Amino acid sequence: MDLRRSLRRWAYARPRVLVTDMPGHDVLRWQVEAELDRRSWAYATSPADTDVLIVLGEPTGELSDAIDLLWSQVPTPRHTFGCSDANFLSRRLDQAIEALANSTTADANRQTEDDARARLASAGLADDADASSSAGQDMGGHAGDDMGGHAGDDMGGHAGQDMDEHAGHDMGGHAGHDMSGEHTGHDMGGHMGHDMGGHAGQDMDGHAGHDMGGHTGHDMDGHAGDDMSGEHTGHDMGGRMGHDMGGHTGDDMSGEHTGHDMGPGHDMGGHAGHDMSGHMGHDMSGPVAGLPMAQTAQDRDGLDLDVLSVALGPVLPGWPTGLVLRAQLQGDVIIDAQLSWTSGADNEAGDIPGPAQARALDHLARFLVVAGWPTQARQARQARSGLTSSDPAVRARAQEAAVRVARGVRHSRTLAWSVAGMGHLTDRDPERPDDVLARIRRWCDIAAGTSDVAEPGPVALPTLASALEGSELATARLVVASVEPKRALTRVEGVRTGA
Amino acid sequence: MPELAADVGTLASTWGVLPAALVVAAVGVLLGVLVSAADRAVVTGQGVRAGVEPLRSGMQLLLEQRRRTLAPDRLLWRVGGAAVPVVALLSMAVVPLAGRTLWSTSADLVWFNAMEALLWAAVWLMGWGPNAVHSLTGGYRFLAQGLAYELPLMFSLITVGVAAGSLRSTDVVAAQDGLWFVVTMPVAFVVFVGGAAAFAFWGPFAAPTGADIAGGVTSELSGLDRLLLLAGRAVFLGATAAMAAALFLGGDAGPWLPGPVWHLLKTVAVVAGLVWGGRRLPLLRPDRVVELAWVVLVPLTLLQALVVAVLAVSGFYA
């Protein structure tokens, strides 16, 4: 046993870490990242890639729900801790290794199952549809429409994943829920609708008056085995995305069935009172797809292409935590972009402390992560950490490193070739270009600390969103990473007038 | 020069098919570890201490829970994931080790190219399978990137075949007796090594697994599935470096040291050059790479093939 444990300790000695920071915790994040870089630990790019989740500050509101959901998607063994200051940081990271090495599969199962139960309960009881809907956004960016897809993913990630390897997980625990009565008139669209799929055999009768319209996440095949015939004429099924009845991916809950028919012909939107008896009798032993199908619409060249509603954020690599981009996606082209802050991330938590030069380096580092330049990103982070040191020798070295990074990025012809001409926020003016490249070069100038360029002000979300319209996903990410998005407009201005 | 092939047996005929295949697979895995370690050393700035990290990551992924997603196309997803390491190891079959390949056909170069082309399907299926936006976007990006690298890569392989007068790997090595091919076909060499980075979606060509799409085709992978994909990619890079050393740098030719040592040294040099050069660049966006490939690289590799063809006709390589 000791040998196995030391082997596990060795295997987990360099875990991959996902750091989420609440507003106003930038300096703490810098300290954490400095320690992670010192230990050569890798940064996770998605929940599936995560071993340790570090939450900086106290998450509130929707952001808290989003982080819960994200955590639910992290594969075991896993460890998480919250952090409001850098005290004992090193010890807590060491403890993370211990926790990963000690966690046994049995523990992990119990934990996962508990989470799944808690989630099902909260999904059923949540009153605020909006809150539960944003809880569904996650880093994975699942193909389903915003909420529905993500919450559904949660089912897949939890209950579902146990089906093969850990027979002990009993989906039957959620079977036989009687949803009638209590849930009459309940708005199910925003409520992680396909969590219902786990409630195999639930009795949905008497739910007339459910408003299912407009809730893109809801689809009826989440109700495997429900008695849907006859009683449900009152359902308004005409939603924005249409409620597809065709995604019978849930039919075969053991997951072997690959005959997932994505054809548009299955879109039943607006077919209120449809006889659904033909969709009954599904095998009910596993996760159910609650994902709406992609619809088609004309793309920018006038061709009919699939349109997918997606939500990016609130946690992504190199992305301002709490920012959510809701958009329609055709291929990887964004249309109808809308940006917002999730509640809990919208407050301007005072000025970010730390020198302007370090802030610029932080900004560069995050941009370089998005631009796929990990070596320069690491050097920018290291320079940033060194600048805040109390040792003058370290600061001097950091200053040299900062100049080196700034010069490397500023003069990179490859980067210029790759990002030039995208993301104009103002009208094109050849004299004063305002594209991604120009903004990044400005951050470089500040980061070098050799010139006194003014820090560019934050950009209002509607301005930013309009710049994302019609761009590819990659471009949109670069554009967002090149600016500082403005948090809660009114409150920020209130602070300024007060000062 | 087909007569050259006659006196060179294959590893399979010497050691038996199974032992030879195991040895070749083991060499492939070791090359993958080498590539992975070199890459880690550069990215994390750890230096030689990163040597053990690929093994550590591999162990960790073996202990990790596998990810499930909602309504995945599981069959195709798993097929794609398993295909990446399998085709990577199959491509090793025509890489000369100690002067011999696992098996030898009159179309070794085509075999190598075919294994690499199968990645189109494998990576796309990886993107399609989990039913997730970022993953699917990664799959799309790989296809776009494929449109860019595939033709120049094929032209560079054809150039080698033209000069050697054979598509058999061992013949190509033998044909470089007097002069390494890299001297007369530098463009083909650079395109071949760059193409390896592109089809292995690594470094500046890692858009299909970009951080901006949360890891793309890897965004929904954990545990064994992630290990298979990442290991397959590393093995492919290692195999291609060994192939580049054989096709352009004279394989195991060299003074004093035994042949296999020379081939290993040349392979390590190619890996070092690839990692060092590749990590100096930011991500190259597939849409821009396509333009570069068709406007610049396709004409350039064709010109290279023309020059080599004229040299071959004039008896330069005889």
Image (spheres, coloured by chain):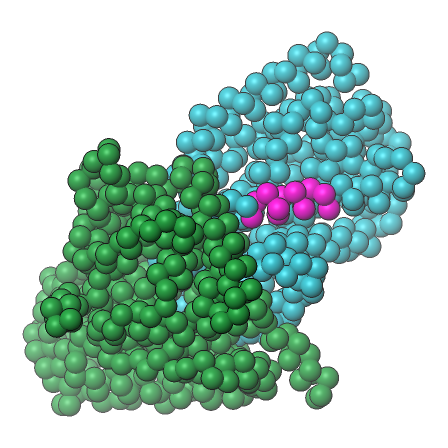
Left or right of residue B162, residue A51 in this image: left
The quarter holding residue A496 reads: bottom left
* Horizontal and vertical percent position of residue A166: 51, 82
Q: Image height check: is A321 above or below A60?
A: above
- Chain A appears what colour? green
Q: Residue at x 76, y 18 (%)?
A: B317
Question: Is residue A144 rendered magenta in the image?
Answer: no
Q: Residue at x 30, y 72 (%)?
A: A23
Magenta stretch, main secondary structure class? helix
Residue A66 or residue A332, whichever sits in front: A66
Is residue A284 visible in the rendered image? The answer is no
Is residue A452 visible in the rendered image? The answer is yes
Q: Residue at x 61, y 33 (%)?
A: B190
Q: Residue at x 11, y 68 (%)?
A: A497
- Chain B appears what colour? cyan
* Horizontal and vertical percent position of residue B87: 62, 49
The quarter holding residue A223 reads: bottom left
Q: Which part of the image, by quadrant, shows the N terminus of chain A?
A: bottom right
Q: Image height check: is A252 above or below B43?
A: below
* Horizontal and vertical percent position of residue B255: 89, 35
| Residue that extends furthest to the front in the rendered view of this protein | A392
Tally the marks.
0
| Residue that extends furthest to the top in the rendered view of this protein | B314
The magenta span reads B268-279
* Horizontal and vertical percent position of residue A351: 27, 70
Residue A14 or residue A33, whichever sits in front: A33
